[in-house]
Image (cartoon, grey):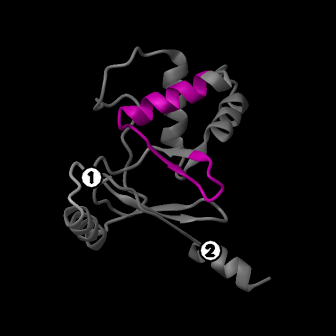
């Protein structure tokens, strides 16, 4: 993941040209992609499946898993593990390497630039003779809204 911007930037719509392998376009793949376009925060496969069911879209849970993994493999969505270790997905506004601040209460995500992390990772890898290094950094905490709610309780 490369350097990013803050959340709220425009996302790539499902119909836009995309990077990665060309996939067969099915109504289920379009429905999953459209649902991701409508969501601002990371979502688990189960949550996405529930959203699709509420919309009246017939996509099985197994198909949802396969489509999300395919989109992640093609670099069209970010996948990470939430605080509970569950894989969650989101169509990110940034197509390159980036990191996230994640609210462990409401799930809000903010894409961030982290040049200091990039320099540190490169230095550590070099010191130990590692090449072709990749990394992810996810920072969990409470967003300002959840912090305020917690303070008022």
Q: Nearer the viewer, residue 48 or 131?
A: 131
Q: Residue at x 56, y 46 (%)?
A: 88
Residue at the extreme right of the image, as rendered? 153
For residue 133, the mark is: 1
SS at mark 2? helix
Magenta-colored span: 63-87
Q: Residue at x 35, y 55 (%)?
A: 135
Front disc: 2 or 1: 1
Q: Residue at x 58, y 29 (%)?
A: 65
Q: Which residue is mark 2?
A: 145
The x, y position of residue 37, in whole percent, is 48, 40
Is 28 displayed left or right of 46 in the figure? left
Instruction: Quote the CA–CA distance across marks 2 and 1.
Output: 36 Å
The x, y position of residue 64, in whole percent, is 59, 27
The x, y position of residue 35, in whole percent, is 55, 36
The image quadrant where one finds the C terminus is bottom right
């Amino acid at each position: 993941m490369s350097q990013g911007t803050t959340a709220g930037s425009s996302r790539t719509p499902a119909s836009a040209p995309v990077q990665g392998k060309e996939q067969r376009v099915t109504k289920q793949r379009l429905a999953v992609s459209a649902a991701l376009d409508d969501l601002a925060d990371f979502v688990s496969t189960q949550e996405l499946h529930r959203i699709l069911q509420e919309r009246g879209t017939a996509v099985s849970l197994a198909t949802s898993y396969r489509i999300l993994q395919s989109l992640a493999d093609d670099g069209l969505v970010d996948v990470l593990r939430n605080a509970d270790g569950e894989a969650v997905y989101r169509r990110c506004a940034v197509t390159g390497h980036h990191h996230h601040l994640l609210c462990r209460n409401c799930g809000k995500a903010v894409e961030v630039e982290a040049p200091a992390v990039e320099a540190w990772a490169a230095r550590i890898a070099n010191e130990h003779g590692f090449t072709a290094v990749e990394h992810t950094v996810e920072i969990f905490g409470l967003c300002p809204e959840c912090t305020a709610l917690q303070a008022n309780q």
